[in-house]
Image (cartoon, rainbow, N blue to C red):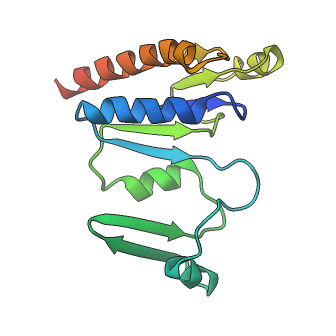
Amino acid sequence: MILQFVGFQNSGKTTAMEWTIQSLSEKGFKVIAIKHHGHGGPPNTLVKDSTKYNNAGAIASLVEGDGVLHLELTQQHWNIEKMLSLISSLDYDLLLIEGYKHEHYPKVVFTSSGEEHAKLTSLFNIQFTIPYCQNLEDKWKHVSKVIAWLEGELVKKET
């Protein structure tokens, strides 16, 4: 199952993704997260040996330790299909995608102003709309409904 969290900057997407991942992981579901870094330029990386390898010209570098694998892969352009192909051999229940708002997957839309709301409601496959909330308690009330729906869908998928 795939679900996108989309909205403009500072609308609460990352916090909601964290809550969703934590809640579903605690219930035994395996979740993968993809984030679109839409701020221009490559994402920030710590300068480690693997980054040095990429800077020297390697198209990919992998670092493994204690069961954790970090992958840094450089390619001219990444799209969702290429990333799905990359993770296709992994065993997971849910893929959460933050961003890539014009993809066709089911979406949770996060709004922070009326103007943004109008732009985002024209997107396809919207399952939930989460309004801007001044405090985390109010945001949690909305996000918990998404989590409950996801859990129900994942349980149905298992049977």
Q: From the viewer's perspective, tell me whether residue 87 is left or right of residue 155.
A: right
The answer to whether 68 is drawn above or below residue 120 in the figure is: below
Towards the viewer: 125 or 24: 24
Residue drawn at x 65%, y 16% as measured from the top left:
133
Quadrant in the picture for residue 108? top right
Residue 105 at least partly seen: no
- Give the x, y percent position of residue 158: 19, 28
Q: From the viewer's perspective, tell me whether residue 29 is left or right of residue 95.
A: left
Residue extending farthest right: 115
Q: From the viewer's perspective, tell me whether residue 60 is left or right of residue 76.
A: left
Residue drawn at x 54%, y 32% as measured from the top left:
15
Residue drawn at x 53%, y 69% as measured from the top left:
73
Quadrant in the picture for residue 75? bottom right
- Give the x, y percent position of residue 26: 27, 33
Residue extending farthest bottom: 56
Towards the viewer: 14 or 55: 14
- Give the x, y percent position of residue 58: 55, 83
Residue extending farthest left: 159
- Give the x, y percent position of residue 20: 42, 30
Q: Quadrant of the C terminus?
A: top left
Q: Quadrant of the N terminus?
A: top left
Towards the viewer: 93 or 42: 42
